[in-house]
Image (tube, rainbow, N blue to C red):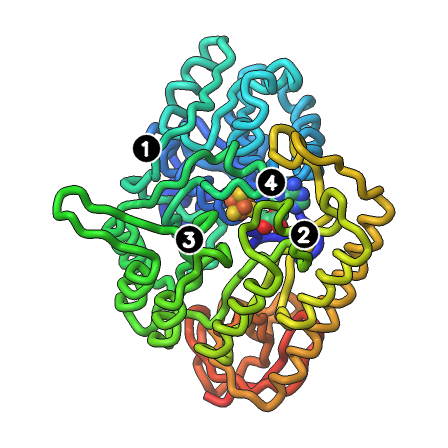
């Protein structure tokens, strides 16, 4: 799930502050600064953490110099992600010298993976908290304030933070993340997530619907339902005996309002059902876009990765999506240079990309993660130059595919949800269409559009990354 990442660069960073009313009235005597890295789930978790801290008397600040508490919500997915965090930690040394009472906390996947050892390795860290232990943060802060370093990395089988109303951080007021499940049971051999985020569990359906309704009533127009594997969403209500799968959840969220857009991420190809696809087709407000990580185009490598599908089976899934929704855009995650990958496996990856004709991809070099099945069973035997060359070829092909896909949009009328001013000029709006493509178009002084409105835009030009157009209505 890499919603926030640049398509080729995999580590992100974003300082955050309340965008809500609480911030303007920020009268708290103690302040925290939180920075999120990695996947959308971490950004969503930071909003839960902000809510927990807020209820316990801590206000946010966007300036690390003003903070009594600095939190890094971390990612472990690749080694580079962890190195980025370690480097960032060193930047707080000076600050800590200046302000001896300042507490530094490492949260999220890296906290879970390295656990208490992080305190030995990174001397300036005071608090280490795993993804399922955020409710205990206020206690851990107290402990650290009294001079004892504090760690809680217990994983849970049922924590979903269902009752916590996230405080929206750095929000554009138009789109928001809503977490629907946590953890992953899939055990892909390269992946550290099952170890850092624990077993899969689904969040109470009523709490999800209520959060989406609240967002809509506050003016939000788009929700992205988040989970490591949303298609295995499965809520069992033990009181009235009802069961809801992802198709049912999607339908219920879609019925909140036809003007509330729904996106979701991530889908495992083995779990996305025809029911989900038919529900997507039935509702115009469910965006026609599926992130469907392939990882590799070689059946042999897929087997080593424990992805549980073959190349042909995956392509069958793509065909099925296009049969049911010809206009649906598909994106993928792709790993270059997994253990034992040979040139012909790499060619299979390039081949499957051409056949699936992905609109976008998130592309990575394989990075061995301690404790994973791959680290235990296989040699990381593809040299770094070969990995880099293969990744470059994958990126080059994806750029070509994105360009070709955008070519076909010329002359089409696209419904665009306006997210704000274009970065390059405030005479232009920027938004996304149903297919998740970024669309930039000139503001029309006669038509009073604002952020959060839908505009119908005729596509007149494009680059590989962006569509350009003019307002029709
Ligand atoms: N090395 C490189 N990429 C990885 N991913 C997960 N684990 C690794 C790893 N060890 C990628 C996968 C996944 C995405 C979130 O990150 O493509 O779908
Ligand atoms: Fe990792 Fe696979 Fe689970 Fe995705 S589905 S989080 S790649 S184990």
Direction from residue 348 to residue 96 in the image, left or right: left
Q: Which residue is mark 3?
A: 230
Residue positioned 64% across, 61% down in the render: 361
Q: Rounded to the nearest whole Å, what is the CA distance between mark 3 and mark 1?
A: 29 Å
- Dot 1: what SS? helix
Query: In the image shown, does 453 or 39 lie closer to the viewer?
Result: 39
Q: Is residue 344 left or right of residue 249?
A: right
* Residue indicated by mark 1: 55
Q: CA distance from mark 2 to mark 3?
A: 26 Å
Determine whether 295 is above or below 89 in the image. below
Instruction: Name the residue that disc number 4 marks.
Output: 189
Q: Quadrant of residue 391?
A: bottom right
Q: State the image coordinates of residue 269 (x, y, percent, origin top left).
A: 50, 58
Q: Which residue is mark 2?
A: 300
From mark 4 to mark 1, how far is it between C-alphas? 39 Å
Q: Quadrant of residue 146?
A: top left
- The picture places residue 149, in percent across and down from the top left corner, at 51, 13
Give neighbour class at mark 4: few <14, some 14-19, many 20+ (Cα, 10 Å): many
The disc, 4 or 1, on the residue closer to the chain's N-terminal end is 1
Q: Nearer the viewer, residue 309 or 362?
A: 309
Marks 2 and 4 in Cβ contact (< 8 Å): no
In primary-sequence order, the first of circles 2 and 1 is 1
The residue at the point 73 percent across, 42 percent down is 339
- Give the residue at x 80% y 61%: 393
Q: 414 or 26, which lies in front? A: 414
| Extreme residue in the left direction | 240
The answer to whether the residues at label 4 and label 3 have Cβ atoms under 8 Å apart is no
């Amino acid at each position: 799930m890499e919603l926030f990442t640049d398509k080729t660069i995999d580590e992100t960073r974003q300082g955050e502050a309340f965008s809500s009313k609480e911030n303007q009235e920020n009268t708290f005597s103690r302040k925290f600064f939180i920075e999120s890295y990695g996947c959308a789930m971490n950004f969503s978790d930071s909003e839960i953490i902000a809510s927990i801290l807020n209820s316990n008397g801590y206000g946010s600040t966007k300036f690390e110099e003003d903070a009594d508490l600095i939190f890094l919500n971390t990612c472990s997915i690749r080694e580079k992600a962890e190195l980025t965090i370690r480097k960032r930690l060193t930047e707080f040394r000076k600050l800590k010298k200046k302000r001896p009472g300042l507490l530094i906390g490492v949260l999220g996947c890296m906290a879970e993976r390295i656990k208490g050892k992080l305190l030995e390795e990174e001397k300036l860290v005071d608090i280490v908290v795993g993804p399922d232990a955020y409710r205990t943060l206020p206690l851990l802060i107290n402990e650290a304030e009294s001079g004892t370093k504090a760690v809680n990395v217990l994983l849970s089988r049922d924590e979903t933070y269902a009752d916590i109303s996230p405080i929206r951080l750095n929000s554009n007021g138009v789109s928001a993340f809503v977490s629907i499940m946590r953890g992953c049971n899939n055990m892909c051999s390269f992946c550290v997530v099952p170890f850092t985020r624990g077993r899969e569990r689904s969040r109470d359906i009523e709490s999800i619907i209520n959060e989406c309704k609240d967002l809509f009533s506050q003016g939000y127009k788009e929700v992205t339902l988040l989970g490591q594997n949303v298609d295995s969403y499965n809520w069992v209500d033990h009181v009235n005996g009802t069961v809801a799968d992802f198709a049912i959840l999607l339908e219920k969220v879609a019925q909140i309002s036809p003007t509330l857009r729904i996106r979701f991420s991530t889908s495992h190809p083995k779990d996305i059902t025809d029911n989900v696809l038919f529900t997507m087709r039935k509702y115009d407000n469910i965006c026609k876009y599926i992130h469907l990580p392939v990882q590799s185009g070689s059946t042999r490598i897929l087997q080593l990765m424990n992805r549980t599908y073959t190349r042909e089976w995956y392509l069958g899934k793509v065909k099925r999506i296009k049969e049911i929704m010809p206009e649906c855009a598909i994106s993928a995650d792709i790993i270059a240079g997994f253990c034992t990958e040979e040139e012909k496996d790499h060619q299979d990856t390039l081949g499957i990309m051409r056949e699936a004709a992905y609109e976008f991809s998130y592309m990575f070099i394989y990075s061995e993660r301690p404790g994973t099945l791959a680290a235990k069973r296989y040699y990381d035997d593809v040299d770094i130059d070969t990995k880099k060359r293969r990744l470059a070829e994958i990126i080059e092909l994806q750029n070509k595919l994105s360009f070709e896909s955008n070519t076909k949009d010329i002359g089409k009328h696209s419904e665009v949800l306006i997210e704000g001013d274009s970065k390059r000029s405030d005479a232009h709006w920027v938004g996304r269409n149903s297919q998740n493509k970024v669309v930039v178009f000139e503001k029309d002084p006669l038509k009073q559009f604002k952020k959060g409105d839908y505009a119908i835009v005729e596509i007149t030009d494009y680059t590989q990354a962006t569509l350009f157009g003019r307002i029709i209505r």
